[in-house]
Every structure is written in C-alpha cells, then in structure tokens.
Image (tube, rainbow, N blue to C red):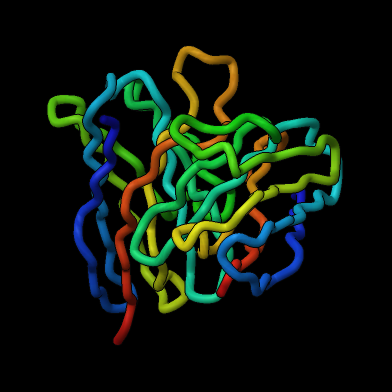
C-alpha cells in the first residue's frame, strides 16, 4: 500500500535550518509530484511547494522562495524539505503529500496520500 | 488568491445524525475542489475529489456536491470515527484550503 513516512519531530533555535524527510513506498516514486505543506497552531493548511521526483524540478510558493529547498534521493525513494533562517512563526506541523502524476498536464491537484506530519518547533 | 470559507466552524452532533458542511469560494473554481478529514496525530485523509467523486475506500455515507463557488460535503449518518475536522481545498488556481469545520459530539 502507498505510504509516506516522515522523519521525527525537531526543535530548533531561531536562525537555524531544519531538514525534514519523507520516504515513499508502495508506488513508483518517480511517477508523482510530492508537495510540502504546513499548518501552524490555529492556522489553516498552507502549501510550500512541490518537487518532481523524476526530474528534480521544483516550484516554490512565492512566500517561501529563497528560503526553502526541496530535493530528492531516488535511490531511497525519499524527498527532503529544508527550511532556512527559522523564526518562531515557523513553528508548525509539516506534511508531505502525493499530488498529480508527473505525466499529467497539471501540477496543482488534490492529494491522495499524506505523511503523518513532522512537528517543527522553533524556540530560543 | 482564492479564499475558501467553510461553515459552520463547529458542528455539534450525535452518532447517527446527518451532517452538512459548506465551502464557499471567493471566485469560481469549476469542480476543482476536494474534501479532507483530519484527525489529531495523522495526515489529512482524502474523502472527495473533483467536487463529487469519492476517493478509494471512502464509505458511501460521504458525498460531495457543488460547482463554481458553492460546495457541500454531506455525511448521511455519523459514525463515531467521523468526529474530526474537515477541510476543503481548491486547485483551480494555485492551492488554497478552507479554515475547517470541526464535527464534534
């Protein structure tokens, strides 16, 4: 069965970086876009960007450009999201989610599978 | 940005009752709307895509309807496991989510 398994919770100091992983299994890793989204306490879900695991191509939401980096390692079916220059406002639950097929004409889509979430806490 | 407004914010019901959740878009999104169920400690679960299609493995008591700017998620008879937060999401232009409706006992 399709699974996305994320790395564990992180506690970071302001100004530091965090790198969260998302390991995919149960399907062809290179076949579907992987998105990263986050939900801060009391806020709604917010998309951060996506990565095409086949090509490595990325598209970041304007808010996160220059600040987030998404990469993948096809040998272990894993995608990574690194967020730099952390602030307290980046305290949130971070999710990876599977989107459209990379062969489709769309990149914005619904998400049929999600990771369990990774809590990132930024505190002095 | 397309804003999705969900109502009500909270729905207090009992098992066996029906639930009707609303999602209104600030501009038309055609049928590019999905619904998710979210429980603590888990990732959201896709229920409905393209406004009215049930996702794989979703029970028939969940149904979606609507097009353009007004959408509805209906749960015909609430089971104990259905008490959760429900979000709508549009992918017509970029991606946005509604603020959620909490269905509580």
Residue B56 % position (x, y): 46, 30
Q: Would you say B97 lies left or right of A40 here?
A: right
* Count of numbered marks: 0
> Camera-side residue: B35 or B103?
B103
Q: Would you say A78 lies left or right of B14 here?
A: left
Residue A71 % position (x, y): 29, 37
Q: Residue furthest top?
A: A103
> Camera-side residue: B104 or A33?
B104
Identified at 26% across, 30% down, the residue is A1
Kindly tell me whether residue A35 is visible in this rendering. yes
Identified at 28% across, 19% down, the residue is A28
Q: Would you say B84 lies left or right of A77 here?
A: right
Residue A3 % position (x, y): 27, 37
Identified at 47% across, 32% down, the residue is A99
Q: Residue furthest front?
A: B16
Q: Residue furthest bottom?
A: A124
Instruction: Give the quarter of the image for residue A88.
Output: bottom left
Q: Would you say A123 lies left or right of B35 here?
A: left
Residue B102 % position (x, y): 60, 68
Assign the C terminus of chain B to one quadrant of the image. bottom right
Kindly tell me whether residue B3 is visible in this rendering. no
Q: Height in image: A71 above or below A106? A: below
């Amino acid at each position: 069965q399709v699974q996305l398994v994320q790395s564990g919770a992180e506690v970071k100091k302001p100004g530091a970086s965090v790198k969260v992983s998302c390991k995919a299994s149960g399907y062809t890793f290179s076949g579907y876009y992987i998105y990263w989204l986050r939900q801060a306490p009391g806020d709604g879900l917010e998309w951060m960007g996506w990565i095409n695991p086949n090509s490595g191509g990325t598209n970041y939401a304007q808010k996160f450009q220059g600040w987030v980096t998404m990469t993948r390692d096809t040998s272990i079916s894993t995608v990574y999201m690194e967020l730099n220059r952390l602030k307290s406002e980046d305290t949130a639950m971070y999710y990876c989610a599977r989107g459209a097929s990379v062969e489709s004409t769309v990149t914005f889509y619904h998400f049929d599978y999600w990771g369990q979430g990774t809590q990132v806490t930024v505190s002095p | 940005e397309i804003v999705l407004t969900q109502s009500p914010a909270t729905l207090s019901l009992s098992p066996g009752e029906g639930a009707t959740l609303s999602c209104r878009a600030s501009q038309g999104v055609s049928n590019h709307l999905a619904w998710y169920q979210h429980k603590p400690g888990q990732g959201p679960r896709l229920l409905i895509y393209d406004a009215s299609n049930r996702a794989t493995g979703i029970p028939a008591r969940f149904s979606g309807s609507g097009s353009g700017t007004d959408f509805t998620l209906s749960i015909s008879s609430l089971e104990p496991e259905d008490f959760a937060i429900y979000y709508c999401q549009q992918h017509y232009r970029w991606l946005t989510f509604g603020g959620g409706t909490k269905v509580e006992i």
